[in-house]
Amino acid sequence: MDEGGLAERIPILRMGEFLLVTIQVDMHDRLAIRLQEELTQRISATRAKGVLIDITALDIVDSFIGRILGNIAQLSRVLDAQTVVVGMQPAVAITLVELGLPLPGIRTALNLERGIALLHAALGTSPPAESRHDRRGE
């Protein structure tokens, strides 16, 4: 039997020089800490230049989870990677502002595509030709 959700994991996918984390489950403290540890290890192991954290499925981001996101951004920066949080629901944004929670080092984008574009702009690189073509078709 799993104690404290230790068997739960949030997948970390590699997309070229970026890592993609899509949070599809309710975050609890242990899972958030585990994500922070695993993500920093993956950044170091893959030498990723950017991290995209998709929180579209989260209805609630409490102060602890917000602080963990901030920690991830700071740790990523130390490891020479940029962090972008994408897909924040309006209610989550309102809650974070009402909590007065600073999110140092966190950049946000409305969706994954804009997050990727933001990372490319921050790194001074160009998105793959396919992505540029897709955006023109919007």
Image (cartoon, rainbow, N blue to C red):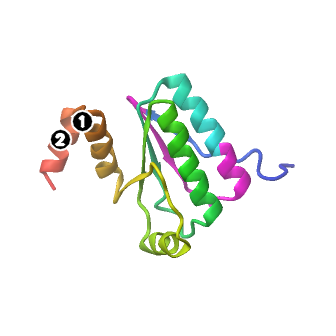
Q: Which residues are magenta?
A: 15-34
Asked which secondary structure carries label 1, the reply is loop
Dot 1 crowding, Cα within 10 Å, few <14, some 14–19, many 20+: some
Which residue is painted at 60% across and 56% down in the image? Answer: 67
Dot 2 crowding, Cα within 10 Å, few <14, some 14–19, many 20+: few
Up-down: is 21 above or below 48?
A: below
* Residue at numbered disc 2: 132
* Dot placed on the residue nearer the N-terminal end, 1 or 2: 1
Up-down: is 16 above or below 114?
A: above
Query: Nearest the camera: 22 or 78?
Result: 78
Q: Position of residue 127 (x, y in %)?
A: 24, 36
Q: Is residue 118 magenta?
A: no
Q: Position of residue 1 (x, y in %)?
A: 87, 49
Q: CA distance from mark 1 to mark 2?
A: 6 Å
Q: Quick check: 134 left or right of 15?
A: left
- Res. 80 mark: none
* Residue at numbered disc 1: 127
